[in-house]
Amino acid sequence: MKQVLKAAKQLNNRKLQFSRAEMSCVWSFFKVSEEDPRYAVCNDCEGRVMRGGVCVKSFNTTNLITHLKNKHPEAFKEYEKLTNAKQRKKSDATMAAAPVSSPIEQVLEKTKKFHKDHQKQKALTVAIAKMIAVDDQPFSVVEDEGFSEVLEVAEPRYNKPSRRYFADVALPALHDIVATHVHKLLDSNVNDISFTTDIWSSDLNQTSMLSLTAQWIDENFEMKRAVLHAQEFPGSHTGTAIASAFDSMFKEWRIRKENVHVVLRDNARNMVKAMEECGVKSLGCMAHLGQLAVHDAVLSQRSVVDSLAIARKIVGHFKSSPLGTSRLRDIQREIGMKTKMLQQDVPTRWNSTFMMMTTLLEQKRALVMYEAYHGLPVSLNANQWSLIEKMTTLLAPFEELTREISSHTATAADVIPSVVALKRFLNKTAETDSGVKTTKSALLEAVNKRFETSFSEQLYYLATILDPRYKDRYFDADLKLVAKNKLEKEVDKMTPSATAEPTPDAEEGEPQEKMMCTPSEGHSFLDMFDEILEEKEQDEQATGPTSVQVHGYLTEPTIPRNVSPLQYWQSNMTLFPALAPVARKYLSAPCTSVDSERLFSAASNVVSEKRNRIGTERAEMLLFVKHNIRLLPKPGKAKRAYQGQLVLGPEADGEGYEQAYLQGY
């Protein structure tokens, strides 16, 4: 009798197990305990888990799922995949078996609003939050009549939340998702990170903000950039206060100071002091140094100052007079010129002054005719027109240089080659030098003074030698020897097992750039790079004992300047494995703080006339999402199911539904 009861009990347990397997995929990882049906036994750890009650009616799978999630994460992921596949299969079967609804029922279904937890409701809400951040839209855009009409036409079932919901719920949620991913990127084997920083003050609400942007090169030699902070910075902008703010920002992002490669800043004394107190390496912005050199040698001259003052008054006349602007356009059309507005300069940006002078020269003929017909409050005489023309010719290479170093691909490796090329250009004679030879000499002297320390800065010359476009071709003999020895020491320090031969220590003073140029007829500024490479390629010889890899790398020909150095290292990191980690470190450094300045240009669009009462916390969230949302990985192909739910395709990377709808699917 006992044997019969035992067999019946086992049969009943098997039926229960089969029934549970039909109901939940979790039974693929458990079995019913033969000793006590109130418990399930884990297939992995053989632990007993309570099924949630003392009788069959009260049994559930909650404890089983919790056990998988806490004890067996890999099994839990497999359970989720099985569950999702089962739900899709069930949904497809339900749709196939569902009777065809009448036209009236279909119309009613399309007018029924989504539930707040509906997948498409969530996806549209996040997409709108993303649009507000990326397109610098005010939160009130969701209440605008035109936007509401577009939503009604596109998806009448969407239950549009209020502007307050987007500001208080949707934006912070989106910010948290992006911030979590940025944290993952920074924690993923990143040893050397470069930063830029600046301080910006809004004219609308008298708010000051302190920026912190980061850039680094990952293991695949891809440059990564992220905005970490654009936070409110109240009080006095002392070096101590800035240093304290930096300590807090580094702590928030779990960035150790030994991982800070360099911070690019402006040349203000409070910034210099702040970086010293914070204990991190910092360098001045190359664009700021160029601004100072131009101001010292050119823009501070009395004759130039007077001419620029008149030029600003002429431009200001047309900026403030609609009638004058209309008359100037009529003259431009009459003489067959393209209608164009004159450009006002910003005195603190020398390149804007250059652009103002350029537009004045372009419109000289129209301006002379305007003065003859209608008169101007002030006018330039012949000598002043000639001076402006010569100044634009003289400053053209500086404008080219500013554009080059302000691009997003510019690095610290561009500093020394650009200064060497600029010096060579200024040493050459040209037909246009008549009347400005003294100014040109003063400009060369100012460049020598402002960039004097660049050639003794280890970060600059190591970045240059590790850039395959430049290598050591822009160094004089002394700097070449110092750079090679420093490079080998850095390789030995970062990769102790690297194949290297010991080299004698060179004299490590402060090498000076001694390249002298033979005057010749003028060429363009960018031609100087090729001219230097041709000379150096012809004379290049390996001198002294060097490591095999360093010698092999340096004796290879340079690559063209329009080819990315990171592409070179992507292809050659296995050929030069000891040099690759050093290149990752030094090529990550920018040469300007332009990233922070561009961030604050975006900040002026966030804290605008339409949003002049926005809080700094929300402003920082908007800036953070706007600049960093592109870092989120694309999840692969995504498809919309009939119910409006998002189903990830087979190429999905497993990041989940959130990553899919964040990309706008």
Image (cartoon, grey):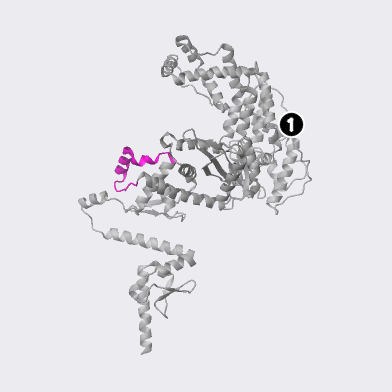
Outermost residue, front direction?
235
Residue labelled with disc 1: 514
Q: How many marks?
A: 1
Query: Is 69 placed above or below 608 here?
Result: below
Residue 272, horizontal then vertical, whole percent: 64, 38
The quadrant in which residue 449 appears is top right
Residue 528, horizontal then vertical, whole percent: 65, 29
Residue 46, horizontal then vertical, whole percent: 48, 74
Q: Is residue 496 part of the magenta span, yes or no?
A: no
Nearest the eye: 389 or 144? 144
Q: Amino acid type of disc 1? A: Lys
Residue 297, horizontal then vertical, whole percent: 65, 24
Give the quarter of the figure containing the N terminus: bottom left
Q: Is residue 611 left or right of residue 453?
A: left
Nearest the eye: 181 or 277? 277
Task: Determine the residue positioned at 71% across, 51% down.
Answer: 499
The quadrant in which residue 430 appears is top right
Determine the secondary structure under disc 1.
loop
One can see residue 198 in this view = yes
Q: Is residue 148 part of the magenta span, yes or no?
A: yes
Q: What span is colored magenta in the figure?
A: 134-161
Task: Determine the residue positioned at 37% across, 89% down.
Answer: 2
Nearest the eye: 134 or 506? 134
Outermost residue, top direction?
372
Query: Is 648 placed above or below 484 here?
Result: below
